[in-house]
Image (tube, rainbow, N blue to C red):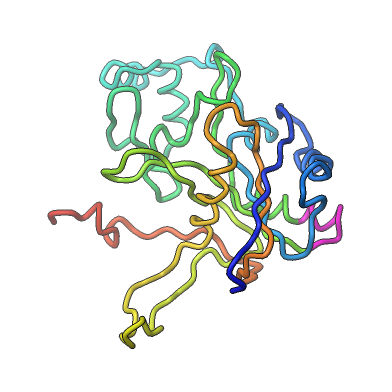
Amino acid sequence: MSGFFSVYGISTGLLVSGDDIIDRVISSLKDTEAKSIENGDILLFAESPLSTTEGRNIRLDDITPSAEAYRLSEKYHLDARLAEVVIQESDTIVGGVPGYLLAGKWDLILPNAGVDESNAPDGWVTRLPADPEASAKRLREEIRERTGKDTAVIIIDSRTHSMRLGVSGVAIGCSGIQPISDERGKPDLYGNKLQVTRRAIADSLASTAELLMGEASEGVPVVLVRGYPYIRCENCRIETISAKEDLFLNLGK
């Protein structure tokens, strides 16, 4: 590794359903120091504005809550219409805290199944991309078709972490990049071979991008990383582990 890489925030302006996000990225890049997309660049897309362009916003007034949604809304103190959207977006509901349901989705445990009221018009919510891996692949192919450049694409979200305050970035879909670096067998500073260490490359890049994207009105839905020496991978995906393998879920067992 060269010891440095560059990160550029791309301000596209407000995105709405049906917008061509790649066109907005290409035109907005002209106003940054990056100027244009180059071979080897990594483009990170925030899930909420991407979902908006994919038509994943939904108006709460159009939702008819089920009996289960009313039950959960009373138990966990949230809008029954929101509870219904979360139910529809979830594989299972495993619990909750006031204001949030804890949902099983894509072999993950997510607050409100990723359904978000922030960065959406009043009375609307944004759902996660229906298939983040497919979205990443589509965006990467569109970039190649329009620019001729071979890049990597990562779809990112912000998440809380067990027993920690605050959020940081996490990758939920990728294309063209190996998201995990297996360090097992490599020697440490004292010659001891690493036993279990795997580096979450895509998650680390997601957190880097979050520093420029922000969480409020920054208006930076895409970040370009240039000069990071990642391993290219055509068919890599963001992998999960089973609950039985998760150290935190098995605490005390």
The relative height of residue 219 versus residue 199 in the rendered view (above or below) is above
Viewer-proximal residue among 34 and 183: 34
Q: Quadrant of the N terminus?
A: bottom right
The relative height of residue 5 versus residue 57 in the rendered view (above or below) is below
What is the residue that sits farthest to the top in this orientation? 61
Q: Main secondary structure of the magenta part?
A: helix
Q: Which residues are magenta?
A: 141-149
Residue 122 position, x and y percent, is: 57, 14
The relative height of residue 223 versus residue 189 in the rendered view (above or below) is above
96 to the left or right of 200: left
Residue 49 position, x and y percent, is: 64, 34
- Image point 72% across, 51% down: which residue? 138
- Image point 83% across, 44% down: which residue? 30
Q: Quadrant of residue 26?
A: top right
Viewer-proximal residue among 71 and 142: 142
- Image point 62% across, 35% down: which residue? 51
Q: Is residue 88 magenta?
A: no
Viewer-proximal residue among 34 and 116: 34
Q: Quadrant of the C terminus?
A: bottom left
Q: Is residue 144 magenta?
A: yes
23 to the left or right of 5: right
